[in-house]
Image (cartoon, rainbow, N blue to C red):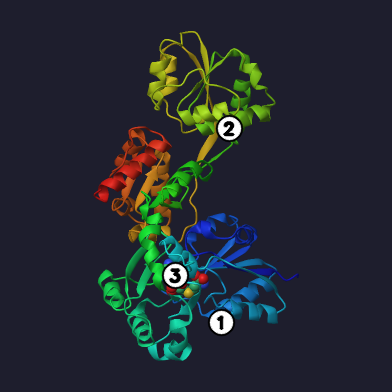
Amino acid sequence: MDKGKVYLVGAGPGDPKLITVRGLEALKRSDVIVFDRLAGPQLLNHARPDAERIYVGKLPDRHTMKQEDINRLLVDLALQGKTVIRLKGGDPTVFGRVGEEADLLQKNGIIYEIIPGITSAIAVPAYAGIPVTHRDLASSFSVITGHESPDKLDHSIYWDKVTNATGTLVFLMGVAKIGYISEQLIKHGRSPETPVALVQWGTRAEQRTVVGTLSDIDDKVKAANLKPPAVIIVGDVVRQRDTLSWIEKKPLFGQRVLVTRARSQASELLAKIDDLGGETYEFPVIETRLPTSDESIRAIEDALGQADAYDWVMLTSVNGVEYFFNWLDRCGIDIRRFHRAKFAAVGPKTAEALASRGIRADLLPESFRAEGLLDSLDSQITAGQSALLPRGDLARETLPKELKERGVRTVEIDVYETAMSAPRDLWLPEMLANGEIHVITFTSSSTVINLLEALRGLGVNNPAETLNHIEIACIGPVTAKTAEENGLRVSIVPEKYTIDGLVEALVERRRVTKGE
Ligand code: SAH
């Protein structure tokens, strides 16, 4: 058997978008992913669904896997012919033990690549508004490990040389030793007034910064109960933070928002939350797909075959538009065969999706719920007309029912099916229980039902109780009603039932809870 290959990849400091393009390509391509917690769990969404995931970090019943065992694991997997990625926090060569991993691979004749990552030593200060060098304040920086007991620390660090060697000093793994580190730096010639910052969980929703001077930082860290992981920055560049801090100023900074929508539809919501400084956590519980039963396919073909018989084509969602055109293509039907029909689109996004196919909707209902459509239709639609409704299998019954009551011949076709999907996610139940998810967004009733079901599948006995410790945001009253019927306490419902409305409501709620 041919030997496999191993990619030793830096995953960046936490924000999953801070991986390199090359690292992401390796991730998408690999058969096996070997990872630990510093390499953000959300990155795994990019892996192939069938890829094997091996967690080598700490578990409640197990310590982190020993480095020698990880080295051996990488070799064994590659000897089985697999393409393996070892994802490591930050950069793999900065206190990442990549040397030991590469060494054993090399001894076993296995091809490997080292793909650098963005190290926390630079990125975490940057996210706190602290550049590690500055034209006037620091022309050099050192990255130093603080991870040793004080006596060993004295063996590995020559304080007399390190203290004044560079303008900026960056310590990793040093939170527990901050008192000792400060003492040594003062003793070896740094002013007690030298500014110091500790940044915990940089680039993530939990990012927190404590600033002081060498003389008082130990007390301040204790008072703030700051815990690892954190980066320590010593030097005048720390003062830059007063003017340069940026992500902390964004309205959703500090919020980790669970997004339950189908991956294909979630991008707009994800991008908006991200732009406002929130951290998104994707857990898509829905997937849409083409119907497969002979019966549904025949119904669609028959309905589309009579394209020139309709007075109306009514589309109620972006998915409806996409799958409608998908079927036209599959059935070889030209859109111009609907030449008699007017088009109605519920909601601006549906109208946009239609417009992108070259069709300007004739009717745009004022309200975004199906009931609103009927009000605006009142004067335009008359008994005896016929309407085609391409939609999903879970679409609500209000619209066809009322159309029929008005004497309209109504043909409904399920152009797509909605199925439950439950990503394999080791972390979510624990994160929910620990308060690491701050807001949950629901964009349809099925996202509510499916999330509860998925959590039960992940071993959460009473999901509603777990979720009720968290802010729950629903896109509109119908979704909120489903949530409440399932025992959830909904705290956020926007005035406008759109993604934009939802995002605005998140920002407003955050403003209120922060007491601004
Ligand atoms: N290879 C990694 C460093 C591994 S050592 C890199 O290049 O970033 C682990 C230490 O890195 C932690 O103890 C902490 O000091 C630092 N660290 C990593 N990620 C961090 C984060 N998101 N926020 C703060 N410190 C972090």
In this picture, is 455 found above or below 362? below
- Disc on res. 137: 3
> Which percent across, then down, holds residue 334?
67, 22
Circle 2: element type:
helix
- In this rendered view, identify the residue nearer to me: 179 or 105: 179
Q: CA distance from mark 2 to mark 1?
A: 51 Å
- Disc on res. 323: 2
Circle 1: element type:
helix
> Which percent across, then down, holds residue 257?
39, 50
Q: Residues within 10 Å of mark 2 (few under 14, many from 20)?
A: many
- Disc on res. 68: 1
Quarter of the N terminus within the rendering: bottom right
Q: Earlier in the sequence, mark 2 or mark 3?
A: 3
**Residue contact between numbered discs 3 and 1, judged by CB atoms under 8 Å:** no
Tell me which amino acid carries mark 3. Leu
Front label number (3 vs 1):
3
- Disc on res. 208: none
Q: Earlier in the sequence, mark 3 or mark 1?
A: 1
Q: CA distance from mark 2 to mark 3?
A: 58 Å
**Residue contact between numbered discs 2 and 3, judged by CB atoms under 8 Å:** no
Front label number (2 vs 3):
3
> Which percent across, then down, holds residue 317?
49, 31
Classify residue 430 as left or right of residue 165. left
Q: Earlier in the sequence, mark 2 or mark 1?
A: 1
